[in-house]
Amino acid sequence: MPTRRYVALYRNVNLGQRTSPTGPQFIEAFTAAGAREVETIMTNGTIVYTADSLARARAIPLAVAPVLHKLTRLTEPAFVRSLAQLTKLVATNPFAGRDLTGVYECCFTPLPDRLAARLKPRLPLVSTRGDCEVFAVIGADALGLTRQVNGKAGYPTKLIETLFDQPVTTRNWNTIVRLIRRTEDGR
């Protein structure tokens, strides 16, 4: 049976903090749920693992949820993407050609499929302060830019959750690029 690498991106996780698991707890929970070759990437709740199928890869965080809740009271969702899917997205260089003058951060926000379909027709989505813009949805992944306004940067998670009342998570685009480079290097 073919195996593939997957990435689970958790919302509001900072490994080792009071309401989050430690790296070893995270890895142990995923391994116990059937994931293989499990590794955490940074401390922001991004974990890479191997599974036999996308369905199995999506089932693993669901199996892990009660374990993490018991350990830390964590109830946050995870968004699963295949490493191949993220590699293809990075290869498209989706921020190329955009005017990044004054941009604080380029952002990646994985969405539930149904939310992606609801968001797409409303693009570009711009916050009232002008500190955040979601300009594209590719598959079920939103891409955005943040700017500082009065010393404070916007955030796609807040913008999307406020408009659609559904939890999401966001990563700095550089985190996704580093994730791909790290896994390509065999790490």
Image (cartoon, rainbow, N blue to C red):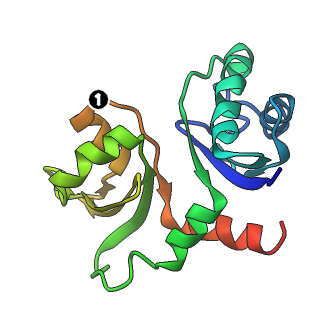
Residue drawn at 75 percent across, 73 percent down: 184
Q: Residue furthest front?
A: 1
Q: Residue furthest top?
A: 70
Q: Residue furthest left?
A: 128
**Residue 9 pos. (x, y %):** 59, 45
Query: In this orientation, does residue 44 appear?
Result: no
Query: In this orientation, does residue 155 appear?
Result: yes
**Residue 53 pos. (x, y %):** 70, 45
Can you say whether 10 is above or below 105 in the image?
A: above
Say what secondary structure mark 1 lies in: loop
Residue drawn at 73 percent across, 35 percent down: 16
Label 1 amino acid?
Asp
Q: How many marks?
A: 1
**Residue 54 pos. (x, y %):** 64, 45
Query: Residue 136, located in which quarter of the rendered image?
Result: bottom left
Residue drawn at 42 percent across, 61 percent down: 107
Residue sitting nearer the eye, 41 or 111: 111
Q: Which residue is mark 1?
A: 165
Mark 1 neighbour density, 10 Å: few (under 14) some (14–19) many (20 or more): few
Query: Residue 34, located in which quarter of the rendered image?
Result: top right
Residue 154 as seen in the image, left or right of residue 1: left
Residue sitting nearer the eye, 70 or 36: 36
Residue drawn at 74 percent across, 19 percent down: 67
Residue 5 as seen in the image, left or right of residue 37: left
The quadrant of the picture occupied by the C terminus is bottom right
**Residue 115 pos. (x, y %):** 32, 40
Residue 55 as seen in the image, left or right of residue 100: right
Q: Residue furthest bottom?
A: 97
